[in-house]
Image (spheres, rainbow, N blue to C red):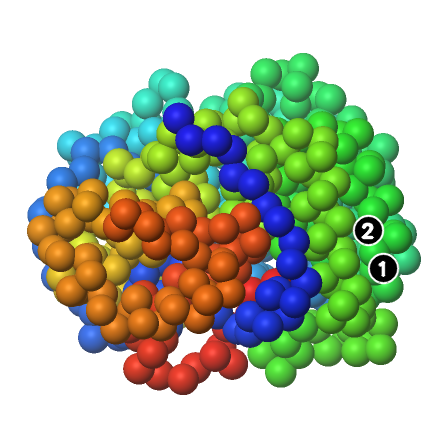
Amino acid sequence: MKQPTQISWDQSMIEKYNYSGPRYTSYPTALEFNDSFTEDKLLTSIKNSKSDKLSLYIHIPFCAKLCYYCGCNKVITRHQHKADQYIEYLATEIVKRAPLFKNYLVTQIHWGGGTPTFLSPEQILRLSQLVKANFNVADIGEYSIEVDPREIELSMLDTLKEAGFNRISIGVQDFNKKVQVAVNREQDEQFIFDLMARAKELGFVSTNIDLIYGLPHQTPETFAETMQRVLDLDPDRLSVFNYAHLPSRFAAQRKIKDEHLASPQQKLDMLHQTIETLTGAGYQYIGMDHFAKPDDELSILQNEGRLHRNFQGYTTQEECDLLGLGVSSISQIGDCYAQNQKDIRPYFESIDANGHALWKGCDLNQDDEIRRVVIKQLICHFDLDMAQIDKKLNINFEEYFAEDLKLLQTFIDDKLVDITDRKITISPTGRLLIRNICICFDVYYREKARQQQFSRVI
């Protein structure tokens, strides 16, 4: 077993390489999806897939309130009947898709949003029963849901437990009231602690807390206070995201004034102290935004060299195909990616017309599949054995990636990457810049100068 991931902060290197880049929840990235991808291609990929295990992602787009920072696919409403209508369409999609996976065992389910807990207890139970009635859902698996602590009763956790969920992710973002007001996300701090306590009482096996740094009125000092409160919560995992201020793309962000945002240096200070605080408290740095306790499965699998990454971020079940259900959701099945209609009205219309909502996607060619393996290895484990890749993919690494290795030289010169005995090792400083390093192996990124379409890496 490898030693846990170590991180070393080097301000000059971080400033040098702090440019935009993909997050590599897929390779090729979603920018390569196109509408020439057809249902027949998806069906062929399902037929040819070597997997017999399935991860389900279900997108619930509704939110009762608009958080000004949010760039997610969402529908702001307080009308519960809209969720009833949406579940009817989800039911049609489920009934259409499920028979294609009759030989699969579902071992992982995640409900994301939007706000999945926008649904009433009755709607949650109805949808979970729909899933179980149509798919072969394992008795033991990872079943998680995103929770907004502002709009629910404590008894919602009892409903989630009854529905089969055993993991929750709570969106906190920041405990500072001034920050909460500025992003239209005021919440009761004590209720969040009560939620965590109740989740443990009910036997939820994992809790995750989401935070965002770089929001209006945040300072390194105020965010340090939030981090201390988070440590009091004692979650199993944390996701600490960088706020990307893109008001030209996300209209709600225009309500956030530029002068209230932290400076680039303050954001770096927040990230630096967050890493020091969490690793000092015993959490393992998994990669990019993610931290986990040493006994959490993410940490264990990373140390064993078996961590996986897909559209849900770092995850545990590499052997699973991923089926996305609902508006905007993305599937990763065999040698293809497929995305549903992005907006709710076209999603409904496509379900009515076709029984499914396929919008676009892409087939992976042989080069895509080779590069996907390499990028995933680096982004999950920060090292790569060329001999193992040669054997796995039937290539000669140095010959196949000759141009890529030339691009890697600047990182080698800066002692962020080392290549010895045909092994690539990312240094403790380089691990914070893993997205930049992976760009060296991204042929699409090289062909198209589209840096402005990605968020900064730090």
Say if residue 348 shows up in the picture: no
Q: Give the quadrant of the N terminus.
A: top left
Residue 81 on image: x %, y %: 57, 51
- Left or right: residue 44 versus residue 171 is left
Q: Which residue sits at x=85%, y=72%?
A: 260
Q: Assess whether mark 2 and mark 1 are in contact (beta carbons under 8 angstroms).
A: yes
Q: Crowding at label 2, few (<14), some or many (≥20) Cα neighbours within 10 Å?
A: many
Type of amino acid under label 1: Thr
Residue 175 on image: x %, y %: 83, 46
Q: Disc 2 designates what residue?
A: 223
Write down the quadrant of residue 180 in the picture: bottom right
Residue 348 on image: x %, y %: 39, 63
Whole-angstrom CA distance, mark 1 to mark 2, is 6 Å
Tell me the SS state at disc 2.
helix
Tell me the SS state at disc 1.
loop
* Residue closer to the observer: 446 or 42: 446
Residue 107 on image: x %, y %: 34, 29
* Residue closer to the observer: 400 or 175: 400
Which numbered marker is on residue 219? 1
The relative height of residue 320 versus residue 289 in the rendered view (above or below) is above
- Left or right: residue 339 versus residue 314 is left
Q: Give the quadrant of the C terminus.
A: bottom right
Type of amino acid under label 2: Phe
Q: How many marks?
A: 2
* Residue closer to the observer: 27 or 79: 27
The relative height of residue 153 versus residue 174 in the rendered view (above or below) is above
Q: Which residue sits at x=79%, y=64%?
A: 266
- Left or right: residue 315 versus residue 257 is left
